[in-house]
Image: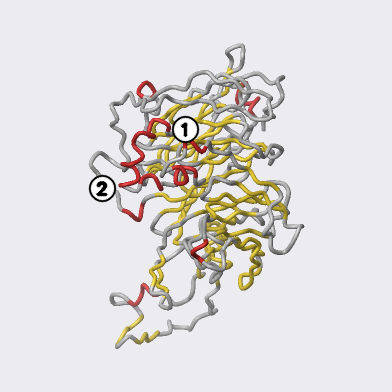
Amino acid sequence: MIHLENGDVGATPPLEWKFSQVFGERSAGEEVQEVDIISAIEFDKSGEHLATGDRGGRVVLFERTDGKDHTLRKDLERIDYPVARHPEFRYKTEFQSHEPEFDYLKSLEIEEKINKVRWCQTANGALSLLSTNDKTVKYWKVQEKKVKKISEMNLDPSACMGNGSLSCQNGAVDFEFPPGGIPSLHLPVVVVGHETNLVPRCRRIYAHAHDYHINSISNNSDCETFISADDLRINLWNLEISNQSFNIVDVKPVNMEDLTEVITSAEFHPTHCNMLAYSSSKGTIRLIDMRQSALCDRYAKLFEEQEASSSRSFFTEIIASISDIKFGKDGRYILSRDYMTLKLWDLNMESGPVSTFQVHEYLRPKLCDLYENDSIFDKFECCLSGDGRRVATGSYSNLFRVFGCAPGSNEATTLEASKNPTRRQAQMPSRPARSLTTLARARRRGAEGPGLDSNGGAYDFSTKLLHLAWHPTYNALACAASNSLYMYYAEDIMENGTTKHHQ
């Protein structure tokens, strides 16, 4: 992660993004089934695998294919063999994680839609991950198993057909001994062949712990526990114990009429197993330390940006609601996404974000229309690059935006989830130059002029890119546009114009 206060790190030039792959691309005019729409996406820590969940309750796994032959890079360069400089993936397997259910006590239908998927630590060659719908978290293991077959026997079932030595009457088989008898009897034996099948198995089901819809799950760095969060509570689980959880955050008031905010997202710190952060519908982020008390009703730090009272309106609290938070790789920074902006927070500075990136400022004049069609409640996710130099989030018309957050960077790229990602760049308002100061409070940066929509306002609010993930070690993005999974990559350009190769 780039330490934003350090002036010794120069700004990096903008990345040139290129199309890599697409899975599930729909043809022109093809109708998309609701159950096929992707609702969750996640790389594992190594970047070797990618998981997606959809509204049909399925989890689809992809594995990386480039460099699988383990040939040394210098050997490939010696024979002038082209070296893949970006990750490429292929379909690995899929399984049905959740089924639609019905809560008879509350007369409530429970959708099978996957809200989140999170990778767990790999052990013994098995892939492990958590998946959740609105009510139930499941722990899955996917492992290659060798195919077992039955060895040959004396009795050949195919001989039952035709005029062989077997006669079949009323389902019974009469075996006629050959002249001289059988020298030896071959009993059926199960033999393990060389073929393998991927077998998904549900190891644990963590149920009946949430009265409200689960919006987040997050693995702890201790690889033993995880949290699940709904609107009012956060529960702590042990991966090996499915019938017991501990309620560590509870914001439910005694009288529900006094409810003023709800939990919108929660995530463990990447390295400190005792710390986690959660965001609220009021635009605040609370950092809590589980060492302080069993019920963490007091926060260690509160991150909040004060809004000028003169600028408040009916929509102020709605657009301030944080839909997603992500820790940086080293845990120093938190990235948050609300409806209008991306904000980067330093854990050492509670007074305000160190950087603000305008994503939907051009929509401010249209908030009334967005409220009428419920688009204002859309929940966009966000992500950081592995080196912490850039952040990304989605938008409407299947667009996504990439911003540079290194000191002095003016990078603000708009791309479309298609095979030609740069074709819409000229139509989007660009972000003027911005500077990052070392003052206690950073300035708002990247503001687009209000109503600047050089595409004539023809943005399609029915096509929205809500889910995306950044590869942990490469400049590669996976974006979910409806039922299609698009993969993009970019190469770092050095100051001398050469390309920086990842090892």
- Tell whether 361 sits left or right of 458: right
Q: Dividing the picture into quarters, in which one does residue 25 lie?
A: top left
Helix, strand or loop at label 2? It is loop
Q: Quadrant of residue 217?
A: bottom right
Query: Type of residue at label 2?
Result: Glu
Q: Residue furthest right?
A: 291
At label 1, counting other C-alpha atoms closer than 10 Å, the crowd grade (few under 14, some 14-19, many 20 or more) is many
Q: Which residue is mark 2?
A: 31
Proximity of marks 1 and 2: CB atoms separated by less than 8 Å? no
- Check disc 1 and report the residue beneath it: 488
Closer to us: 449 or 178: 449
**85 versus 279 height, above or below:** above
Expressed as whole percent of the image width and height from the top left, the position of residue 398 reads 37, 37
> From this viewpoint, is residue 254 visible?
yes
- Disc 1, SS: strand
Question: Which residue does the image show at 65% across and 46% down from the upper left?
Answer: 302
The label shown at residue 263 is: none
Q: Earlier in the sequence, mark 1 or mark 2?
A: 2
Task: Tell me, yes or no, if residue 198 can be seen here.
Answer: no
Image coords of residue 64 (percent x, y): 54, 41
Q: Which one is in front, 266 or 445?
A: 445
Q: Nearer the viewer, residue 31 or 414?
A: 414
Judge the density around disc 2: few (<14), some (14-19), many (≥20) Cα neighbours within 10 Å: few
Instruction: In this rendered view, identify the residue nearer to me: 282 or 29.
Output: 282
User: What is the distance, in whole Å, between disc 1 and disc 2 at their CAs?
Assistant: 25 Å
At 62% across and 25% down in the image, what residue appears? Answer: 406
295 in relation to 357, above or below: below
